[in-house]
């Protein structure tokens, strides 16, 4: 999630994870009860008619599994290696904006929950928490998501702050040069709420100066987004950054290969949670082409519609090295703060281990493409 989040407190204080919740999807209804209509529209909504929003979830479900039998699965190993770091599982937290609107402890609670679940969290430029406080929130690995600003000196300082705070990689959002048609947001009161100012962007000159009375086509722009991003911008950031850079928002194989050529340390297959361009392909369908184009040169991470451990397994079968979860982490944060985020990740981790055992794949390396039917 990106520009346009309302920074407000939940309607009711978060408690523990309800006993009635047994799957990640169960938390969605509990989160809905705790948020205002406007905030819920922002969390749940997609672009325009929300066709791609449905496709994201549905594409994982439509993939059919073909399990092996008579395999010793007495020990299941879900561990992966990502950018030189060993992780006990491949389930990471995606960058989403303004966590204070979901829980008063905001991003630090998200980081603590991810750390407790032995995960890695990606924190957003548009979060409610300063970069320094993000670094202090938990003793665990984290990455920083970056919206490059038109003022490159400001962006340079932001990168330096993230590195100094301990971020181990930069996630460059490349699929959001301007806003999409957020119809659900507009019906509930608009994209933004007066007073929403991410601490990380305090003092940043606007990337685009939108006139007070914009003409219709000018309403697509947001001052936090730089519509002039190009491949040269990615190359500039790779040269600038002392830590790895991963472009997020890639769906085309040719773009993925060009990211590698520009020096990217990894590629994140994403359609921004189907929040920008409607009828864009679901990430489960985009993933195989990107994996084929990159051919192991750098890690591939995927997000969009991951709701079950079987979805995680399918992503790994199709060649992803890890997955990112966005809305589910927000549901957990809303319902139970850090405990809720931890519960969401651990539930998916448990389901992944179950799926691997039942597929006859005791390790991540055993999740080969022949486990998808038809082969």
Image (tube, rainbow, N blue to C red):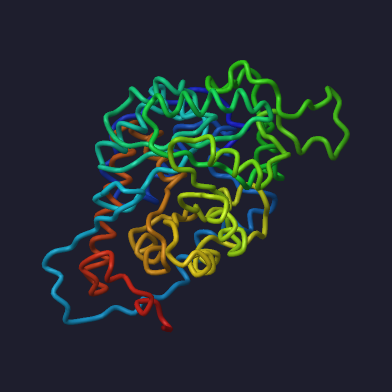
Q: Is residue 285 left or right of residue 114?
A: right
Q: Residue at x 34, y 41 (%)?
A: 120
Where is residue 99 shown, x and y percent of the image? 46, 29
Q: Residue at x 71, y 28 (%)?
A: 207
**Which residue appears farthest toward the left when viewing the image?**
74
Where is residue 334 shown, x and y percent of the image? 41, 33
Q: Nearer the viewer, residue 142 or 306?
A: 142
Residue 320 position (above or below residue 150): below
If the image is split into quadrants, where does the C terminus sit?
A: bottom left
Where is residue 2 shown, x and y percent of the image? 58, 36
How many marks overall?
0
Where is residue 287 shown, x and y percent of the image? 50, 64
**Which residue appears farthest toward the front when viewing the image?**
239
Q: Nearer the viewer, residue 223 or 353?
A: 223
Q: Residue at x 46, y 44 (%)?
A: 327
Residue 199 position (above or below residue 124): above
Q: Is residue 66 left or right of residue 99?
A: left
If the image is split into quadrants, where does the N terminus sit?
A: top right
Question: Which quadrant of the structure image shows residue 114?
Answer: top left
Q: Residue at x 34, y 38 (%)?
A: 341
């Amino acid at each position: 999630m990106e520009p346009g989040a309302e920074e407000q407190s939940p309607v009711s204080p978060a408690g523990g994870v309800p006993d009635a919740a047994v799957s990640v999807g169960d938390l969605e209804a509990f989160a809905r009860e705790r948020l205002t209509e406007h905030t819920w529209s922002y969390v749940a909504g997609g672009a325009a008619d929300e066709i791609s929003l449905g496709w994201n979830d549905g594409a994982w479900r439509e993939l059919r599994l073909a399990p092996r039998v008579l395999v010793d699965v007495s020990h299941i190993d879900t561990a992966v290696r990502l950018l030189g770091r060993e992780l006990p599982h491949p389930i990471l937290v995606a960058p989403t904006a303004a966590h204070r609107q979901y829980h008063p402890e905001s991003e630090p609670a998200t980081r603590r929950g991810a750390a407790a679940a032995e995960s890695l969290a990606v924190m957003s430029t548009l979060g409610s928490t300063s970069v320094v406080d993000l670094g202090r929130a938990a003793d665990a690995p984290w990455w920083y998501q970056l919206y490059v600003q038109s003022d490159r000196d400001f962006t340079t300082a932001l990168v330096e702050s993230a590195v100094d705070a301990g971020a181990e990689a930069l996630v460059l959002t490349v699929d959001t040069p301007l806003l999409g048609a957020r119809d659900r947001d507009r019906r509930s009161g608009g994209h933004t709420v007066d007073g929403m100012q991410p601490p990380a962007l305090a003092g940043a000159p606007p990337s685009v100066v939108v006139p007070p009375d914009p003409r219709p086509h000018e309403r697509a722009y947001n001052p936090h987004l730089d519509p002039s991003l190009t491949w040269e911008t990615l190359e500039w950031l790779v040269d600038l950054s002392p830590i790895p850079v991963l472009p997020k928002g890639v769906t085309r194989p040719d773009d993925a290969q060009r990211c590698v050529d520009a020096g990217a340390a990894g590629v994140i297959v994403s359609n921004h949670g189907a929040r920008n361009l409607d009828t864009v392909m679901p990430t489960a369908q985009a993933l195989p082409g990107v994996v084929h184009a990159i051919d192991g040169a750098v890690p591939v991470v995927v997000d969009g519609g991951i709701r079950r451990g079987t979805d995680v397994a399918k992503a790994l079968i199709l060649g992803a090295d890890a997955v990112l979860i966005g809305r589910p982490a927000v549901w957990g944060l809303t319902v139970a703060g850090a405990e809720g985020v931890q519960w969401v990740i651990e539930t998916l981790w448990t389901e992944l281990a179950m799926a691997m055992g039942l597929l006859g794949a005791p390790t991540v390396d055993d999740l080969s493409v022949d486990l998808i039917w038809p082969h």
